[in-house]
Image (spheres, helix red, strand yellow):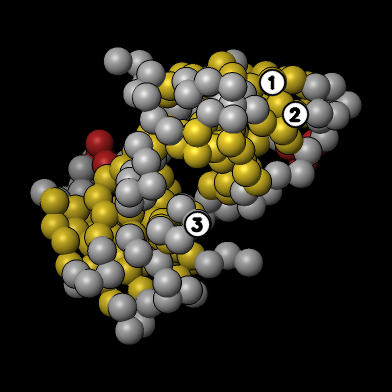
Amino acid sequence: QQQVKQSPQSLIVQKGGISIINCAYENTAFDYFPWYQQFPGKGPALLIAIRPDVSEKKEGRFTISFNKSAKQFSLHIMDSQPGDSATYFCAAYKAAGNKLTFGGGTRVLVKP
Amino acid sequence: NAGVTQTPKFRILKIGQSMTLQCTQDMNHNYMYWYRQDPGMGLKLIYYSVGAGITDKGEVPNGYNVSRSTTEDFPLRLELAAPSQTSVYFCASSRDASWSGELFFGEGSRLTVL
């Protein structure tokens, strides 16, 4: 049973465009929603994260939007660059049980 | 500061063979984890440990075993390898129970079972 569903599976965007990745979760008891970025041949690394009491968080060109009532959150990559080409994972963290659940991942390709 | 180091990076096993994936971290983190990554499935937790001598099952523990004799090391043992265990394995660590979702990952170990 996948508690965090991520879409799309892959995404191609032109340089300078906006990449949008969506996630939905099924459990209301999550405490924190991190996003991880993974380059080929490397392990995932934390990119940005948001708490459920915040509707939006921005760090540079990366923005998380969070809709608690809809149980959805999304990552926007503004002015996408070829160096942003990577796989992105959303995740949901539950403090009780110290559990982190990952979405299925989105492979983003930014064309120059 | 090396972070989380995994060995080997690549390995091919025959069905029924056994092997151990090594993981060590130099950040003095109490929590360590083993995940497997399959295409389109994200990362699935195999086992985790909250400190030396303490381990617990994750989402997909069958066919694997772990031990945690020191804070630094968290090896993953595969017994009687099966094709279903073909995957990329990631070891990770985190600071403590208040880490709020930040894991530090190794670079992965790609295992193929033929």
| Vertical position of residue B74 compared to residue A25: above or below | above
Looking at the rendered structure, the secondary structure element under dot 2 is: strand
Image position of B109 with respect to A58: above or below: above
Q: Which amino acid does label 1 sit on?
A: Thr
Tag 1 residue: B20
Amino acid type at circle 2 is Leu
Residue B33 visible (yes or no) = no
The quadrant of the image that shows the C terminus of chain A is top left
Question: Alpha-carbon neighbours of circle 2 within 10 Å: few (<14), some, or many (≥20)?
Answer: some
Q: Which chain carries label 1?
A: B
Residue assigned mark 2? B78
- Residue B7, given in percent of the width and then of the height, sits at 56, 16
Q: Position of residue B33 (x, y in %)?
A: 52, 37
Q: Disc 2 is attached to a residue of which chain?
A: B
Determine the image quadrant of residue A19: bottom left
**In the image, what residue occupies the spot 50% across and 33% down?**
B51
Image position, residue B27 (x, y; %): 34, 23
Q: Which of marks 1 and 3 is in front?
A: 3
Position in image of residue B47 (x %, y %): 61, 41
- Circle 3 residue: A97
Report how far apart the C-alphas of labels 1 and 2 lie in the structure.
6 Å
Distance of label 2 from label 3 (alpha carbons): 25 Å
